Each structure stands twice: as structure tokens, then as C-alpha cells.
Amino acid sequence: MNYVSKTAGVTWKSPSNIALVKYWGKKGHQLPANPSISFTLDQALTETSIQAEFKEQQSGIDISFSFENAKNEAFELKLKSYLQKGVQQFPWLNHYHLDIHSSNTFPHSSGIASSASAYSALALCLCSLHEEISGEKLVDFYQLASFWARMGSGSACRSVYGGYNLWGKTPALSNSSDEYAVNVDHLIHPDFQAFNDTILIIEKGQKAVSSTRGHALLEQHPFAEIRYRTGFDNTERLLKILEAGEIKDFIQVVESEALMLHALMMSSPTPFILMKPNTLAVLEKVWDYRRQTGSNLLFTLDAGANVHLLNPVVENAHVQEFVKNELLGYCQNELYFCNAIGNGPVKQEK
Ligand code: PMV
């Protein structure tokens, strides 16, 4: 391979996403046991810059990594083994030193999952560097970025595009794939195109059980096969619902996906509970509020204690009132983050 640039540099800002149908359980190497659907957020972002310098002598992966201006050796090691997987695709990785700087727009310890934004930003940087160093244009730039984001963290592959994205092969969509996510915005009813996600920080800090371990625990789970089948069915159902604009059915599928995710954790042979008493209290409050007001506010959950409140943008003023008046007391330090559906990653100009 010919290297046309001895130095190259790139910066991408990439968002997190929230899953509506959950990916929980893997098969093979970083492939999903069932398809999942998410929308991309507009405020929870990771910004990653990589400066690449050609090395005359050395070969092998050679990087330095800092997170929010502090050297982070634990993540540097993780990154090295991640990049090692990319050498065949990006052979220049063995011949350049990479200086990587990363930061988040949300506090690291807030319990907001950062692996989706982090690995999507990183994969986009790799694809851009590849173009700069090789002088070749990548035809399927975002598809390749999604593929490499997935190799770092499954959910990250859904973050390389804005709007609604689907990851995992499903008979409902001919261009779907287990290897990368595809954008499904063209299928989405206008009523679902303007949505908010208010993330209530119920508990900051590291989760007791990582999602890597959570995925692995599904392998021994007595309900695994039923879960995977339900994930397939809910993906097909949700696609139809998103196309038709049926909000009541949307609420039913999305909330049941969130509760099923946590029910799987609790019913695992090695059980664990990531919800906290305040998580449950908020879920009940949301149900009460919906019963009393006829609102279309709903919740979903990540693999953690925080609650994602979803609502159509037209209802946002009322929802924000409800959050301030009735839910802040359940949040740690009254912390919450407002997001809308985002337009996806943005390459920063030099
Ligand atoms: O991408 P991972 O391996 O951190 O797994 C993410 C799992 C969930 O956030 C719980 C669900 C999902 O589809 O994002």
C-alpha cells in the first residue's frame, strides 16, 4: 500500500444513541443475537481527534491516548487490542504513531453510556485517516465506519448516522445486516421524526455489571431463545409502527423492551439488578402521569439505573414541567440531560 501522507489528522464529534428494541446477547464475534432499532441523540457526544505520524523504523500498534486531557492507560490498552483487529483493513496502523484525544459533552461518571459515542467517533476517525493516508476514497464510508464501531461496542454501530437506525439482519428489511447498521429514516412517519429523550440521572458512577458481562450471561440464560425471538418480532413490529405513526403501539413495544432487558438481568442464573428504587419510582410516576393526562410520555432504560423519558417534541413543554415538578427529587443531585433526535456525527474542520 502506498502512503501519500506522512502526517494526517482528523476530528469527529459523534453521538450516543438510545435503543428502542434492545440488543442484548451476542453470537459469533460481536454479532447481535437479534436485531435492534435506535434513534441517535443530539447532545450526548464524544469528540475524538487523532494525529497520525509516519514512523521510519518501528512497526506494530503504537498509540498514546488521553481522555479529557488526562492520560488514560487502561483505555489505551483496550484501544490497542481494538486497533489490532483493524490492521488487515487499515494496514497503515502498523506504520504510524497515533496520538488520540477524546472528550465527552456529558460527565464521564454520569452513568450515561459513552461506548456508543466513543467507538463511533473512533471508527469515523479511522475511516477518515485511511482516506487521507492512502489517498483512496472509501465508497461505503459510513458502512465501514459502522462495521468498525461495532467491533468496539455493538451499540456504537447505530451511532454513525442520524435519526433512526437498525442493526441486525431482519426479514423485514432487505438491506439489513448483522455486520453494520443501516439508516431507516426514509421509513419513519413524520410523527416520530421529532422526539425528545430526557435522561434522568438516577445514579452516577460505574455500573455494578458491565454490558460485556451482561451479554455473556445470556448464553446460559433459560429464556435466551425466547428473548431473541421476541427481539426479532419486536423489530418487525416496531418498523411497521414507526412507518404507520402509531404512538400507542410504540409505547407498548418500547416500554416492554426496556422492562424485558431488566427482567433478563434479574432472572439470569447469576442474577443482577441494575435498577434502583428511584428508577422504579420514576417508572410508576410516568405511568400515573400518562393515565392522568393522556400524554404520550414513555420510558426506556439502558443497562443501568438511569431513565430515558421519550416524548413527541410537541409535548415537550408539558413533559419538562412534569420533570421539574415531580421527578427531580429522584435524580442524583437533580441531574438530567435533555436530548432530541440528532442528525448524526460531524467531521470537524481543521
Ligand atoms: O454496545 P454494548 O455492548 O454496550 O451493549 C448495549 C446494550 C444496551 O444498551 C442495553 C442495548 C442497546 O441496544 O443499546
Image (cartoon, grey):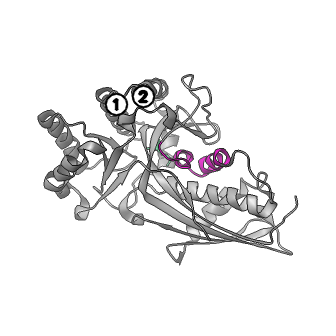
* Mark 2 CB lies closer than 8 A to ligand 1: no
Image quadrant in which you'd find residue 119: bottom right
At label 1, which amino acid type do we have?
A: Phe
Which residue shows up at 52% across the image and 77% down it? 70
| Closer-to-camera residue (81/194) | 194
Which label's residue is closer to the chain start, 1 or 2? 2
| Picture quarter with the C terminus | bottom right
Image quadrant in which you'd find residue 336: bottom left
* x and y percentages locating residue 29 in the rendered image: 65, 41
Categorize mark 1 by other alpha carbons within 10 Å: few (<14), some (14-19), many (20+). many
- Please give the residue where the numbered disc 1 appears in the rendered image: 250
| Closer-to-camera residue (139/197) | 139
Disc number for residue 238: 2
Range of magenta residues: 142-163
At label 2, which amino acid type do we have?
A: Leu
* x and y percentages locating residue 322 in the rendered image: 17, 49
Viewer can see residue 306: no
Q: CA separation, marks 1 and 2?
A: 7 Å
Dominant secondary structure of the residues highlighted in magenta in the image:
helix
Asked if 97 appears above or below 211 in the picture, the reply is below
Q: In this view, does 278 lie to the left or right of 112?
A: left
SS at mark 2?
A: helix
| Picture quarter with the N terminus | bottom right
Tell me if residue 171 is in the magenta stretch.
no
* x and y percentages locating residue 147 in the rendered image: 64, 45
Which residue shows up at 47% across the image and 24% down it? 236
The reply to whether callout 1 and callout 2 are in contact (CB within 8 Å) is yes
